[in-house]
Image (spheres, rainbow, N blue to C red):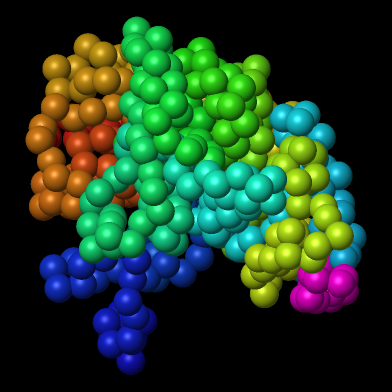
Amino acid sequence: MSISELDAKHIWHPLTQHHTSSPPIPIKCASGAVLYAEDGREFIDGIASWYTAVYGHCHPDIIKAVSEQMQQLDQVVFTGFTHAPATKLAQKLFEILPPNQQKMFFNDNGSTAVEAGIKMALQYHHNKGQKRKVLIALEDGFHGDTFGAMSVSGLSVYNGPFEDYFLKVVRIPTPKGANNEQVASTLQELIATHDCAAFVYEPLVQGAAGMKMYDAAGLSLLLDICKAKDIITIADEVMTGFGKTGKHFASLHINTYPDIMCLSKALTAGMLPMSLTTCSQHIYDAFLDEEVTKGFFHAHTYSANPLACTAAIAGIDLLLSTGIQERIKAIEQQHHAFAKALLKHSKASGVRVKGVILALELEVTMERYGQKRQALYDYFMDLGVCLRPLGNTIYVLPPYVITDTQLKKVYTAIENALDHF
Ligand SMILES: *Cc1c(COP(=O)(O)O)cnc(C)c1O
């Protein structure tokens, strides 16, 4: 049987209605910013394979580091043992994270990083003898697909069948500059009327919501209010981390740092699944006690997998390299120039850029998973460009190694789509 036949026979794909969807495209290999299909077609990976492969697919440095590591130590239980890949990763990462971050906890994907963050915050209050049950989240946030993560996510398209089983969550709008004071007072009202434990947010850019961008000063205000009430701030940087907003982390655009951070996606450079929940010393200290059960009894079997840690170390080395830093700046500049050109187009609205992220609204009504949106997706694919519009929001988040010519091709595809739809 062919790949496609076997796939149709046995495989259940994520975010897919198999009754109506067209069959997935078999991909044979990938290199740099390009995906190569079995049938000979090529696609520019305009979203870095869901924001993971930011240094390019199959980067030789990552391959070399991981191949060497796999001959040394493949996997070991991370309770009772430790290893150099984990400690070296810690050393490298804490040099670039906001300076208040001190400890890291390993998980294996973005959702479980958020899940662990929520559990840390809830147990932090529990250990202090306080009953705090309510979580604060932003409207339209997305934090993953496990129950805690779904609970704080505000995108109902994913949550429908499960809402009855959620944690208690109250929501505030994103601060947009003009409404900062109003959002701040909404937050204060909620805090006064609920036992709030934590505030979970995607800093500055809400990815799944459609790369919605919001105000740093407004977020800073919200974080200060939370800090004053010992409400644990949890920055979900699963999407924004590792250079995407122009700084290593979006939280570095703001002076008030989060208590807890969630990292995944580009963490391992698109090579292996892993995530981290990092926290400040004062969170960690609340779990130290003579009583065993005050510890954080949460674990994933593949915690700190040495290969994944090694990919992450090699990824950070690349992130800090002059070559990649220059590409991040160059992409941002080109995005700004393209955004300017787009503003003249009657069918483009809400054009925005932050770091390597560019997004715009196509002035055509589209459902998030409707037929028109599918036609737009197919249109890009026919032009050899992989973009995944979120409803009528078209966005680009390319691998940093994308060449100027390839980026131009992505822009041209978007311009053509604006004329075509
Ligand atoms: C993708 C994403 C998640 C979920 O990560 P998974 O690895 O898919 O579980 C959580 N938060 C944000 C902001 C994300 O972009």
Q: Residue at x 30, y 14 (%)?
A: 341
Question: Is residue 49 something one can see in this rendering?
Answer: yes
Q: Position of residue 77 (x, y in %)?
A: 79, 75
Judged left or right of residue 101, residue 187 is left
Q: Residue at x 22, y 20 (%)?
A: 349
- Magenta span contains residue 233: no
Q: Residue at x 29, y 45 (%)?
A: 155
378 shown above or below 212: below
Q: What is the magenta segment's predominant secondary structure? A: loop
The quadrant where residue 12 appears = bottom left
Q: Which residues are magenta?
A: 69-81
15 shown above or below 144: below
Judged left or right of residue 170, residue 74 is right
Which quadrant, please, contains the C terminus? Answer: top left
Question: Is residue 330 something one can see in this rendering?
Answer: no
113 shown above or below 362: below
Judged left or right of residue 394, residue 264 is right
13 shown above or below 54: below
Judged left or right of residue 240, residue 276 is right
Which quadrant, please, contains the N terminus? Answer: bottom left
Decide which of 198, 306 is in the foreground and name it. Answer: 198
Q: Position of residue 199 (x, y in %)?
A: 50, 36
Decide which of 211, 299 is in the foreground and name it. Answer: 299
Direction bottom: furthest residue: 1
Decide which of 105, 287 is in the foreground and name it. Answer: 287
Q: Position of residue 141 (x, y in %)?
A: 38, 39
The quadrant where residue 257 appears = top right
The quadrant where residue 250 appears = top right
Decide which of 242, 203 is in the foreground and name it. Answer: 203
Q: Residue at x 73, y 65 (%)?
A: 293
Q: Position of residue 74 (x, y in %)?
A: 78, 75
